Image (tube, rainbow, N blue to C red):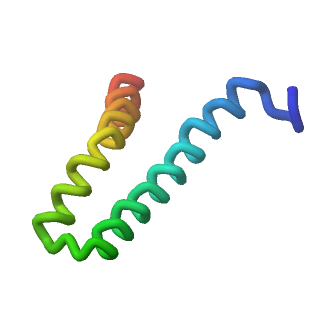
Amino acid sequence: MIFGFTEAQISWFGLTFGVGAFMLYMVFIIAQLAWESKAGKLGTFVLFLALGFGMTGFIAKQVITWILAK
């Protein structure tokens, strides 16, 4: 136990909130990249589609796990 939490609780918190915060930061980075490159609407969409595609897998895994847990 660390600070009264088990290893499983710390891992769940880090995976859920830590990775979620990192994903929000990645969205900021993609938006900043689109803004600085003056990508336009289509270019911004393509950037978010290509660079943000990996995040959809993580989100889908969380949603599927939540649905199956019911």
Q: Is residue 42 left or right of residue 21?
A: left
- The furthest residue to the front: 37
> Residue at position x 35%, y 42% from top?
55
Q: Nearer the viewer, residue 57 or 3?
A: 57
> Residue at position x 50%, y 48% from top?
20
Q: Nearer the viewer, residue 34 or 24?
A: 34
Quarter of the image that includes the N terminus = top right
Quarter of the image that includes the C terminus = top left
Compared to residue 68, the image places residue 20 above or below, namely below
> Residue at position x 52%, y 50% from top?
22
Q: Is residue 32 left or right of residue 3?
A: left
Q: In x, y percent, where is residue 2?
A: 87, 32
> Image quadrant of residue 39?
bottom left
> Image quadrant of residue 48?
bottom left
- The furthest residue to the left: 42
Q: Nearer the viewer, residue 48 or 1?
A: 48
Q: In x, y percent, where is residue 41?
A: 14, 71
Q: Is residue 49 left or right of residue 35?
A: left
Q: How many marks?
A: 0
> Image quadrant of residue 10?
top right
> Residue at position x 23%, y 76% from top?
38
Q: Is residue 30 left or right of residue 45?
A: right
Q: In x, y percent, where is residue 45?
A: 17, 61
